Amino acid sequence: MQIVTDNGSNYKKACELLIAEYPHIFWQPCAAHTINLMLKDIARFPEVDEVVISAKRICRFFYNTKRLHEKMRNTVGGELIRPNATRFGTVFIFLQSYFDKKDKFREWMVSADWRNSEWRNEPDFDYVENCLTSSKWWTDLKWVLDSVEPLYTMLRYADQQKNGTTSGFQLRMTNAIHMMEAHFGSGTDEFKKYMSKVAPRVSHLYTDTLLNAANVLDPEGHYKFKRTTRFP
């Protein structure tokens, strides 16, 4: 019998006590929660945090008043999908909603409609314009999206209620690592930095659980053999 919970230390401790009494029971951390924690760790990297903070500041400006919110929605063709503070996966969707409307935003920022709008004297008006007309701002945003997209794809797979399997998760995680390696470059410091957040949490899924992987990631994203066991 297998119990799956999130990665909270209280859950793990409770399951350790249960397994001590009933050795046939195994505990496994939730794969979706594990990936979300990876994304949360990565969100603390300065280059990611800077983009997210900037995007949130722009979003607050557009959503500060009902009239401006409606104007933005009608002009760019939809909403910005605002993030959930407890799930970094939703931050990816938030940034993607910007990128999907990139051309509309840039077109609006250089129009007379924007320059002569009733909000031109509002705080952050210039900041919003400078960001949304900046090639560097959009390049940085796209870089973040490309960096976390393999993990976000894994999160969507792990989050589904049906059709998710252990073998399917393992295969997709391997592919996600390869995609990140291609994005950052094999053996680069950047790749190693991101893997320092990914590898330990993947290994945590494979250690002392019923996950039939028998493989663990090392800090550079390579698999090594490890026998799986249960709690003592």
Image (cartoon, helix red, strand yellow):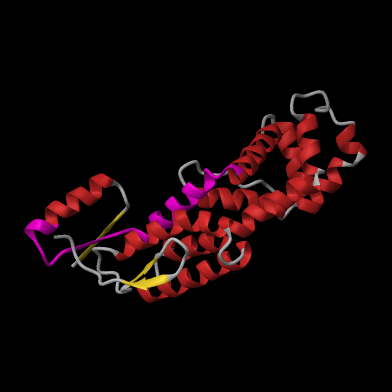
Q: Residue at x 69, y 37 (%)?
A: 58
Q: Residue 121 or 131: which is nearer the viewer? A: 131
In the image, what residue occupies the spot 74% across and 32% down?
Answer: 67
Magenta residues span 19-46
Tell me, yes or no, whether the highlighted magenta stretch contains residue 28: yes
Does residue 79 appear to the left or right of 42 in the view shown? Answer: right
Q: Residue furthest left?
A: 21
Identify which residue is drawn at 65% across, 43% down.
51
Q: Quadrant of residue 189?
A: bottom right
Where in the figure is residue 166, as x and y percent of width and height? 36, 72
Note whether 214 is above or below 76 in the view shown. Answer: below
In front of the other: 105 or 117: 105
The image quarter containing residue 180 is: bottom right
Quadrant of the drawing holding the N terminus: bottom left
Quarter occupied by the C terminus = bottom left
Q: Which residue is most to the right? A: 112
Q: Is residue 231 visible?
A: yes
Q: Which of the 4 image quarters holds residue 160?
A: bottom left
Q: Is residue 164 visible?
A: no
Q: Is residue 25 magenta?
A: yes
Q: Position of residue 182 (x, y in %)?
A: 61, 68
Taking the spot 48% from the left edge, 58% from the top edge, the residue there is: 195
Residue 108 percent location from the top left of the image: 84, 44
The correct choice, above or below, for 212 with respect to 159 in the image is: below
